Image (cartoon, coloured by chain):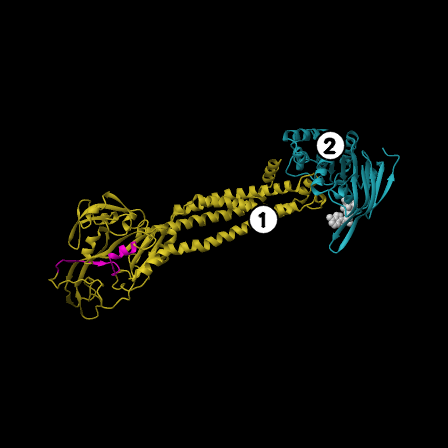
Amino acid sequence: MFFTYLRRELRRRRKAALVVASGLALGIALVIVVNSVSSGMNQAQDKVLQSLYGLGTDMTVTKAAEAPKSGETGRPRFEFGAKDDGEEQSSDRVMVQGFQTLASSTVAKVAGQKGVADSVGGLSLQVMKVSGEFKRGQFKQGQSGGATRQGGPGGSGGQPQGQVEGGGASFDVNSYSVYGTDVAKQGLGPLTSSKVTKGRTFKTSEADAKVAVADTSYAKEKKLALGGTVKIKGVKYKLIGIATPDSGDAAANLYVPLKQAQTLAGAKNKITTVYVKATDSQQISAVKATIQKNISGTTVTTSADLADTVSGSLSTASDLAANVGKWLSIAVLVAAFLVAGLLTSSAVSRRVREFGTLKALGWKSGRVTRQVVGEAVVNGLVGGALGIAVGLAGAYAVTAISPTLTAELGSGAGGGARGGGMAMGGPGMRQSAGKTLDIALSAPVSATTITLAVGLAVAGGLIAGAFGGWRASRLRPADALRRVE
Amino acid sequence: MYQLRGVTKQYRRGKDTVDALAGVDLTIGDGDRLVIQGPTGGGKSTLLQMLGGLDRPTAGSIELDGVDLAKLPEARLTKFRAESIGFVFQSFNLIPTLNAQENVETALVPLGLKAADRRERAAQALNSVGLGERLGHLPSEMSGGQQQRVAIARALVKNPKVLLADEPTGNLDESMRDEIMDVLETMWKELGLTFIMVTHDSSIARRAPRLVTIRKGRITITENSKAV
Ligand SMILES: Nc1ncnc2c1ncn2[C@@H]1O[C@H](COP(=O)(O)OP(=O)(O)OP(=O)(O)O)[C@@H](O)[C@H]1O
Ligand SMILES: [Mg+2]
């Protein structure tokens, strides 16, 4: 009888059931979408962080920021001899990224700290290649507005009777990054976020070999071929492998053995960053504190710290999802639960005589309550199914549209060496300096999210059932004679 | 056999209390047919609720075969209603979403019968009130008289000791009223149960062998030797 009655009620009172169900569906759909978009955001942020750190790195150790001293070296400076007109010149300038280094021995010191599972040092370099020519300007009389103007100093104006024309420099500035990797310890560090898809990675014997691995997109751009050579500051390196990042951007354009990088930069026994893996991922902040206390002059940056420095639309959107989205879905859920409860309760009020009659016929109060709760739970499940369908559709739509979000890393963190129009990053956020990544947002729906949705549907049904059931349990058999309707 | 002693029922309405029954003493023998009449608000329905165990008196005792319904715990009272009482209401009180047969079955649900037995007995009961052809009809697909016959089948399907009817013809037009009265009287005669009916209809009252008139919660009993 329970199921017959239940089926009949739900079928014949479809509209009322649908109202309750769609309220719950709305709440549940919102939870699914917000949840999956949030996890999409997290994935996107993980991708951003991973492309900087490599897999498995819990934190990095860098030299503590110092106040930038004026007139100090570090600013890129190119020296070109005043050669003859029109002669092509070229100059490579190798700089340590962020201009601050730690001694190589720091790696061992870090490794000795409590809670550190593994650590490896690396040297990030920025190479700036400038090539081009100077031309002396020529003064021309009269002819305002006639001749084509070529850029360069003195090329503007036109107020006087003549102008300097054709002067200036046409230079190509070409900047790329080189990462010096510890070939003995390749399990940690930036290169782990890429897979060597062609050729091979470094051998442990190649600690000081003139070999290089190139990032796939850089190799394509520069038409570097496997087995060929690539020149850095005049030194030839044999290209032994092509690396493809798992996601996002690569950590560097070229990878060379650490010793080679140190030689290139004139930074013997120096590193920029120590990549650290903690023994327990729950203890990261404790490990951070230990390192910072015991090794002076260092800055320890955890993934969480770095995540805080992510700005741009990705961080705006993920803040939005975490705050507005969460509260909105909670509010809608609570409202849906309440509405479902009140509607169920008022439905019971309209059926006072019906339930009173059943009690007069000798139905136990519990049986009547069970019937009401059963109806509400089915409403909840229908709402859940509807909500899951709508939620999945919503999440699928987000993934299909995959809006692009940009993540700016460390921008605005200490401006020190940002002059000259070339964003070199401040001393604060070294390897992340001014990096901008485009990440396509997806909204993956996890099994946990679906389980949560089903749980919410049942909970919604039970809450509605509790309202209605409580009302029904208080009816008396004499209510069979009540004048309602 | 019913034995009512000093049955009082007070309803509280805000600060006021209404004496719906004010000390009713009444004895009803097994197999009796009793008609209750009186002005509106006199307490007829209240008395019927007391007899059927739908409610408890404020004071007094209602003994049925020596068991005081006023003192019976809730669970026992529910069981008593399920087993011994058939109730017919003025406005039929059928479950609108269940068909005729399922409505009759609801009376058998508390008795713990197997579904097949339940269906079988419900069909039989509907047959005996002349609705054998309409098992699958919804209340909304039947006339008032037919609905009331379904309600009578529902009241009788459990073979109750007592049949209580509160103005069973109150919502019906004249032709249907006679039809329902015929069904009820036939059933009473055939099944040998105690039949207590509230009515406004003086023509029905006139035919009753024993008439209880209730005014402001007090009863007067009229024996009618000329009853049919
Ligand atoms: N649940 C209740 N709460 C408060 N007062 C009630 C309740 N039920 C009945 N009453 C009051 O008790 C008195 C008797 O009511 P009852 O329903 O027994 O009268 P009745 O004789 O059946 O009247 P009618 O012919 O209109 O059906 C009336 O004054 C009524 O207003
Ligand atoms: Mg009445």
Of the 4 image quadrants, the one containing the N terminus of chain A is top right
Among the 4 quarters of the image, the one containing residue A68: bottom left
Q: Amino acid at mark 1?
A: Gly
Q: Could you say which is closer to the camera, residue A485 or residue A354?
A: A354
Tell me the quarter of the picture where residue A146 sits: bottom left
Percent x, y of residue A304: 37, 55
The image shows residue A42 at horizontal and vertical percentages of: 39, 51
Q: Residue furthest bottom?
A: A160
Colour assignment, chain B: cyan
**What's drawn in magenta, residue-wise?**
A86-111
* Parent chain of label 1: A
B40 displayed left or right of A222: right
Residue tagged 1? A341
Report crowding for label 2: few under 14, some 14 to 19, many 20 or more residues within 10 A (C-alpha). some
Using the image as rendered, state which of residue A421 and residue A303 is in the foreground. Answer: A303
Q: Which residue is mark 2?
A: B159
Instruction: Judge if badges 1 and 2 mark residues of a common chain.
Output: no
Residue under mark 2: which chain is it in? B
Residue A313 located left or right of residue B110: left
Q: CA distance from mark 1 to mark 2?
A: 39 Å
Tell whether position A91 is magenta. yes
Asked if residue A409 shows in the view, the reply is: no
- Residue found at the very far left of the displayed protein: A84
Q: Residue furthest right?
A: B225
**In the rendered picture, chain A carries what hue?**
yellow
Residue B197 seen in the current view:
yes
